[in-house]
Image: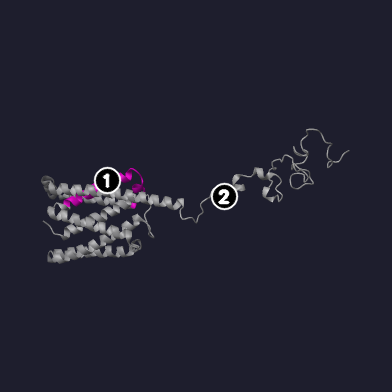
Amino acid sequence: MASYNQHPPPVDNAPPPYGYGVPANNQYGVPANNQYGVPANNQGGYPQPPPPGFNIQSDPYNHGYDQFKTDSQHDPEAAVAVPKATDDWNAGSFSDKTIRRRFILKVYAILFAQLLVTFGTICLFIFVKPIKLWVQNNLWFYICAYVLFLVLYLTLICCPNVRRKYPNNFICLGLFTLVFSYMTGTISSFHSTEIVLIAAGITAAICLAISLFAVQTKIDFTLCSGLLFVLVMALFFFGWSCLIVYYALGYNYILECVYGGLAALVFGLFLIYDTQHIVGGRKYELSPEEYIYGALQLYLDIVNLFIILLGLMGKK
């Protein structure tokens, strides 16, 4: 019997030796005495695909398997460049900036609508004589509005599910804006038209300057929550002291100016504090889901500042 390693006799028009593979009883597709996949003396055969699990890179002679490589393996420059984590641009930061920009636009759009409703209510109460007289003679309605204001404010502040869930958040915020606008319009009706308009213009200028300062400054006012709490407590007890003095000694304009100046300072700091929370880029910032909360805080800062300036400029 002829041995396995002996070559068969030549036949006309026959393929090269071992061109169509190897005996089927060899699980690796090549003779057992050849570790590189094809016979060493085969120069013109038809190379077979590598068996499963065969590592092309481990073949130092690379017998005919280059044809199974991809273009990127032949030419490293043809491979697609994958951005690394250290690249200047990455999708995560771009997405965060886009979300923050949309959040800011949404907050200020809501704030603009709130201020528009409030300013329209004030103009209605100071320019329309019957309405002006009615709100001045029915202060019980102002008290009811104040109670409803407290309920809505505490609901929006203390219940995250209410202020984050659409459309309940917009309904509550809309009711809050209407109630607070009525209160502001009632207060404005006790002042002359000129003083109200001047106070509104001064408030707009101050808020614009403070907002630009809050965006541009490198000072992080979001870390000053403790200071703001102390100022609020001082303002609260100083206000009660002023009331006691008024009832005991009568009205004192200088004392009212001091109280008004302190209140304006406190709400100006709150405006900076809330603006930096919304714009972001500081140690503490609002979540993109808190657009109702952000608009609510800015709205209260601006309108309270307007009421304080209105009180400092005197009554009719």
Residue 274 left/right relative to 245: right
For the point 34% across and 47% down, the residue is: 162
For the point 12% across and 66% down, the residue is: 249
For the point 32% across and 51% down, the residue is: 293
Q: Look at the image and say whether residue 164 sits in the magenta stretch.
A: yes
Number of numbered labels in the structure image: 2
Percent coordinates x, y for residue 34 in the rendering:
77, 46
Percent coordinates x, y for residue 24 in the rendering:
77, 38
Q: Please state which of residues 305 and 18 is positioned toward the viewer in this rendering.
A: 18
- Residue 271 at least partly seen: no
For the point 35% across and 61% down, the residue is: 222
Q: Which residue lies furthest to the right in this view?
A: 1
Quadrant into which the N terminus falls? top right
- For label 1, the SS is helix
Percent coordinates x, y for residue 210 in the rendering:
27, 59
Closer to the chain start, of discs 1 and 2, is 2
**Range drawn in magenta:** 158-186
Q: What residue type is labelled 2?
A: Glu
Q: Where is mark 2, residue-wise?
A: 77
Q: Where is mark 1, residue-wise?
A: 174
Q: Distance between the residues labelled 1 and 2?
A: 60 Å
Residue 130 left/right relative to 216: left
Judge the density around disc 1: few (<14), some (14-19), many (≥20) Cα neighbours within 10 Å: some
Q: Which amino acid does label 1 sit on?
A: Gly
